């Protein structure tokens, strides 16, 4: 069991229930890597597993072979069970997936040391046959005021990829499970204005054509969890530095239906 992998993904568990200004960004190297698996990922949809593997390897990601949730913490199991059953390959950026011969305490220490200077990016590649259907990517960063651009920059770039001449466009954003948005610019502005943590979700669907074979188009989803003061205290109590998580999935519209 590669325990260090779950030190990387355990971050999401704290956010499962789930500030400042629109300023801070990822380190340039990490931002480039995250853009590769989010903003630029639509170009990968439909490509072969070999092509995807080379693309991700060239971008600095390392394949994590034989990943299983069998011995994962319960809160991680619950959140990732469905995804892990569909995902064929997992990739890690920021922590070497081969570094697994360590205790949980050592893993947490490595997690904290890593996010002090850089980010951790976890990627799941899902295939239909040998063609990429969906790429789901999450970046984990140390919490800081004004880090919303880590999410909003990617959201803006994905939204721009919706064609103006699409047959149908569906977009919706929700903040803190109750405030709904119909306009993407208002949605990201609200994220930037959040003062004490925020849980935001969005989905964009572009149907480019409808044929006898079905729908042609793409879908993207985004989730931003910036912890509240209470959540940050819980993280620290568990031994973690407070962190935020931005997650995106991009893929063929058929894969989401």
Image: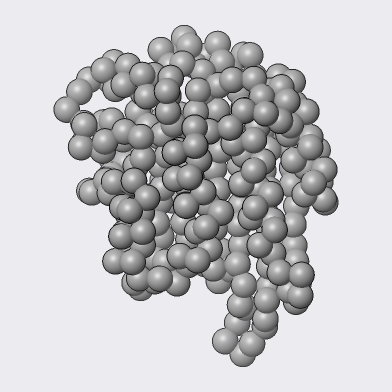
Q: Number of callouts in the render?
A: 0
Q: Considering depth in this image, is 42 or 211 the residue closer to the camera? A: 42
Residue occupying image coordinates x 46% and y 16%: 241
Vertical relation: 242 (above or below) 23? above
Report the quarter where the C terminus lies: bottom right
Residue at 22%, 20% in the rendered image: 103
Left or right position of 240 against 250: left
| Residue 90 visible somewhere in the drawing | no
Relative to 115, does residue 165 appear above or below in the rendering?
Answer: below
Asked if residue 151 shows in the view, the reply is yes
Q: Is residue 235 above or below residue 50?
A: above
x then y, percent, for residue 32: 48, 45
Q: Outermost residue toward the left?
A: 101
Quarter where residue 110 is shown? top left
Name the quarter where the N terminus is drawn: top left
Choose between 84 and 125: the one closer to the eye: 125
For residue 225, what is the image quadrant? top right
The spot of residue 218 in percent (x, y) is 60, 67
Which residue lies at the image location 41% right of the left edge and 34% below the top edge?
A: 120
Q: Position of residue 33 (x, y in %)?
A: 44, 45
Quadrant housing residue 204: bottom right
On screen, residue 21 versus residue 140, left or right, reads right
Residue 161: percent from the left, percent from the top? 66, 62
Q: Nearer the viewer, residue 186 or 129?
A: 186
Color theme of the render: one colour
In the picture as drawn, the residue positioned furthest to the bottom comes out as 212
Q: Is residue 104 left or right of residue 15?
A: left
């Amino acid at each position: 069991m590669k325990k260090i992998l779950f030190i990387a993904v355990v971050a999401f568990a704290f956010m499962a229930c789930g500030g400042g200004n629109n300023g801070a960004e990822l380190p340039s190297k990490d931002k480039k890597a995250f853009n590769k698996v989010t903003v630029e990922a639509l170009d990968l949809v439909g490509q072969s597993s070999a092509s995807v593997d080379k693309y991700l390897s060239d971008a600095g990601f390392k394949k994590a072979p034989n990943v299983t949730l069998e011995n994962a913490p319960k809160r991680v199991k619950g959140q990732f069970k469905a995804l892990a059953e569909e995902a064929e390959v997992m990739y890690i950026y920021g922590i070497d997936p081969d570094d697994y011969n360590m205790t949980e305490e050592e893993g947490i220490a490595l997690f904290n040391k890593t996010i002090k200077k850089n980010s951790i990016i976890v990627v799941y590649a899902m295939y239909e046959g040998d063609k990429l259907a969906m790429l789901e990517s999450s970046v984990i960063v140390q919490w800081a005021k004004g880090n919303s651009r880590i999410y909003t920059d990617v959201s803006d770039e994905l939204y721009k990829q919706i064609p103006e001449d699409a047959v149908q466009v569906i977009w919706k954003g929700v903040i803190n499970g109750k405030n709904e948005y119909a306009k993407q610019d208002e949605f990201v502005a609200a994220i930037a204005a959040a003062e004490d943590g925020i849980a935001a979700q969005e989905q964009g669907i572009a149907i480019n054509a409808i044929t006898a074979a079905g729908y042609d188009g793409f879908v993207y989803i985004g989730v931003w969890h910036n912890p509240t003061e209470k959540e940050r205290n819980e993280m620290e109590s568990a031994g973690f530095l407070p962190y935020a998580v931005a997650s995106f999935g991009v893929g063929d519209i058929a894969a989401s239906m």
